[in-house]
Image (cartoon, rainbow, N blue to C red):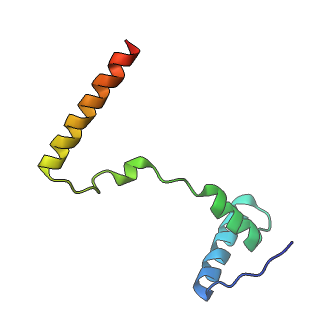
Amino acid sequence: MAKSIRISEKTYMRLCELAGKLQADLKRPVSIDEAIGFLMETQKPPKITNLAGTLELSDEEVLRIKRDLRKLWQRWGSKSA
């Protein structure tokens, strides 16, 4: 079932450009709907590494986290031994 959505002129133009590029690559007509589907399929989930360096911690907080992790790793290691 077809649905109507409102998008800005700028977004529509960008979708048309994408559809044109896809049409050139695929060598066949490409609809706006197919261009949107292409965007959704190629959308990659965010990676945890994207967060690297974004957390601001004091030296004291880093030491506390490391200490707590060591304690947890020791408990975990003793259960598997």
Q: Quadrant of residue 36?
A: bottom right
Residue 41: x, y in percent? Answer: 66, 56
Residue at 41% across, 48% down: 48
Quadrant for the N terminus, please.
bottom right
Quadrant for the C terminus, please.
top left
Residue 80: x, y in percent? Answer: 40, 16
Instruction: Looking at the picture, tell me which residue is in the foreground, 66 or 45.
Output: 66
Residue 16: x, y in percent? Answer: 67, 77
- Left or right of 42? Residue 79 is left
Instruction: Looking at the picture, tell me which residue is in the foreground, 8 or 24.
Output: 8
User: Would you place residue 26 above or below residue 36 in this image?
Assistant: above
Seen from this angle, which residue lies furthest left?
A: 60
User: Would you place residue 53 above or below residue 38 in this image?
Assistant: above
User: How many numbered circles does the render carry?
Assistant: 0
Seen from this angle, which residue lies furthest right?
A: 1
Seen from this angle, which residue lies furthest top?
A: 81
Residue at 65% across, 61% down: 40
User: Would you place residue 77 above or below residue 5 in this image?
Assistant: above
Residue at 29% across, 57% down: 54
Q: Quadrant of residue 42?
A: bottom right
- Left or right of 22? Residue 56 is left
Instruction: Looking at the picture, tell me which residue is in the foreground, 2 or 78.
Output: 78
User: Would you place residue 75 above or below residue 25 in this image?
Assistant: above
Residue at 80% across, 77% down: 3
